Image (cartoon, rainbow, N blue to C red):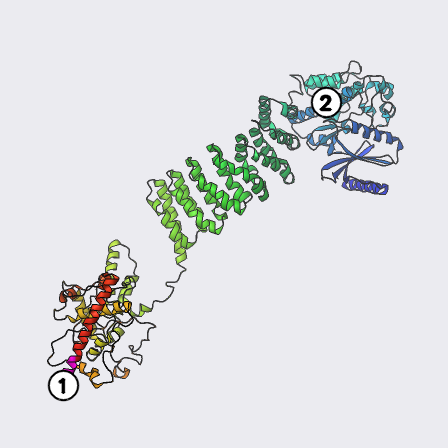
Amino acid sequence: MDYLRNLGSAAVSTLVQKSGLNLPFSLGPKVASLDGICSLYEGTKKDDSSLVSIFEYDFSQRRDLAPLAKNSLRKLRTIRHPDVLKFMDVVESDTTVLIMTERVRPLEFILQAWASKGVHEREDWIIWGLHRISVALAFINESCASTHGAIRTKSVFLSLSGEWKLGGFEVLSNPKDDAAVLYSLGSLLPDNMSWAPPEVKKGGWSSLKQGDPPAADAYALGLLINATFNPDHHPPATASPPHPPPTAAARANIPNTVFSLYKKLLNPNPKGRLTAKGFLEIGMSDSGFFSSNRLVKVCLGLDNFALASESEKMILLRTLHESVDSFPSEFATDRVLPSLVSALEYGGASAATIVPLVLRLGKNVSDDKYENAIVAPVVKLFASPDRGIRMALLDHLPEYADKLDKKTVDGKIFPHLQTGFSDTVAVIREATVKSISLIAPKASPLSDRNLNNDLLRFLAKMQQDPEASIRTNTCILIGRLGPTLGYNTKKKVLVPAFLRALKDPFVHARVAGLMAFMATIDCFDVEDLATKVIPNMSFALVDKEKLVRDQAFKTMELFVKKLENYVATMPETVTPNPMDQFTDPVAAASQGTLVTSAAGAAGALAGWAMSSIGKRLAASDMQTTMAPSTVTSIDRPTSAPPPAEDSRIGNLRPSPLLTSMSAANSTVTSPALPIRSSFQSNSKTKGMQLGASKVPASITAAALAETLAEEIAAEDRLESNPWGDDDLMDVNADEGDWSAFETAPASVPPITVIPAVVAPKPVAASTRPGFNSNGFAAGTSAPKSRTPIPRMPSNTSSTISPSSSTNDWDQDDAWNTPSNAQRSSSPAVPIPTSTMTKEERAAEMAKRKEERKQRIAMLKEQKKHAGKS
């Protein structure tokens, strides 16, 4: 069959090409041959690719059929009615007429498919179709005063919407028309006598010219009723002479309400015969079979929807909601749906009811038609300010969200949708928040600008909404949007947003915040997880509500587990500690042990502190000397604050004069290794006793050294040459030799002097067993950097420096103030210059300079006396 259809299509195309005609359509396969007069083809209109049907009249072999083809063309052009075939275009030649109409299918093919349907459903469908044909026939008979003359199943077609359309206008004629063909060429129709009324069978087609135009068509309408309800019993017995009236047994599948009128239509007497108009009027009465048919009521209601009252609209919409699923699929999608979409343009209270119905019917629409049939009209409704329409659109968004594309959402939906965030009605605000989860990540992602900027601003506002449910749903929405946000947006937005939810007074909002943290765990870096997320959510562990506490512990467990998995892959340390070689193994082992109790933690902390104080010096450090407490290079812990700029010890620099005086007495040999423990023990013991730091009263030189150091530091800030412009002595003269200062004068009053520190002469490595050439203990390498260790002064020194405390907790005070021992042994301690003004400091420095010159002059005199003696 398909081969023959394709062959016929090819033949027509070849014929048209030879004639040089330009077709406005693309000819498709052949559908059927209608009584041998014309052939029906499928086609596509070239302008808009819409589906059409092509009726091809080829009278190249039968020239007598040319008048019928031209009459059909003329009548289709002039008769326009919703229930008549819609004429669209025509292509004519000397031997061919191609008429383009809307896409239709012959009724006789569809009847076979409906034979398997239910009795009630099939009955409703046929009555609805007969109603459409009766309307069209009444229009032709009454308004056009014409006779169709060829009412039969092959003259009825079904459109894409399933509506019955009347065609077959080959012999349609007006008795007053001089070019009427029915009365002279009606016999050319194949099988014309089986559908002809008794008067035609008796007197021929020409007898109709003197009769009533509706009479012949009314008789054919009765036969059509029988052919549709009883296709296997056609024609009925009453159609044959002597035309007996139909019996009850002949009714078969014809409904009782129709059967009585069916008999009147088949009346052999044309004057007593019921016309198509009368048949329609009776059927449309209050108790008529047409008016009670649900399909008929729906069609009438949709045709008059714009003019109907609100109550009538609601009745129709209620009927559709109740019975739309039982409608023929093509009727629902191609007849009801377009009418409802058109009705949406009028808005009103019924629009909110139409939207869910439109979406319900749209489920049966194919994907290629859904965009134009459903999406386009529905999207336009977002611009409507009507709250009922907006609510209906948002409630049913899941039904069409997956059909939306990015361009439609960004350009046509979101600009109108965002107004719902600021609506005064809470229901609209909440529905708007819920809708974002459908159009943002799943259906059609929003643009980065809308998602990361505009939308987040609205959601931040929604988290402060008075309605608790809106705040909760907003937090849930942010949690769902988290993976789709930009990297920087995630770091800035997620933690503050969820933290705000955790502080919400509504219990379920706090739970939603915790669940949102869990849902977006992959959005956080492990560093952010440890430094931002966990610290910010930890307070929820002690929430007043058990529901929140339980969820908080589950969330914390999830985060901690992720951190544990991450740190398991980390190295134990990043860079080696250069001081590890000097660490006591026992202390290191104790510090590396995990503590599981509070008491254990306190004990471990105390043990660590005492180990740090008592075992600071390494073995190699014991082979060096310790300097007095006035030395500047003191090994400070890194945690101690730096000394002040005007600190006496920090700014102390030894005087060249004092350095030379103590040079002979300051060089000592490094003590042996056992001395370390005795020194540590002694210093520890004295450091823990009251008055341990007290210095004998005879040692006043320490106070003088501190005073001189303070003067030198102050003079460095005031002038470039603190000693003045005069030379202290002539270094080339014999009397200027410093050897006289190596021994104290015989009869000179004692002068208390603070010795400066002079580095000892290095001892050769060969004279120190157990040490290598670099001066380090054998078997060890020199560290890259060493902090100078303070050296203890020798007992042979001219003075004894105060013992320095080893208590690290008191070092901060030791950096800035003199010890109690120093204050007690030096009652005349100079006033620190740090507390003076600039003028006072200058005066003090001048005074001290003069005193220093006097002391130097005294020392020169003493030298001269010592040389003479």
Q: Position of residue 403 (x, y in %)?
A: 59, 41
* Disc 1 element: helix
Q: Position of residue 357 (x, y in %)?
A: 58, 31
- Judging by the rendered image, the residue that carries numbered circle 1 is 868
Is 276 left or right of 844, judged from the image as shown? right
Q: Position of residue 755 (x, y in %)?
A: 20, 74
Query: How would you rate the neighbour count of disc 1 (Cα within 10 Å): few for under 14, some for 14-19, many for 20 or more?
Result: few
Q: What's under tag 1, amino acid-wise?
A: Lys
Q: Main secondary structure of the magenta part?
A: helix
Three-letter code, disc 2: Val
Of 585 and 305, the residue lying toward us? 305
Residue 216 falls inside the magenta stretch: no
Quarter assignment of residue 214: top right
Magenta part of the chain = 861-869
Residue 163 x %, y %: 70, 29
- Label of residue 135 in the image: 2
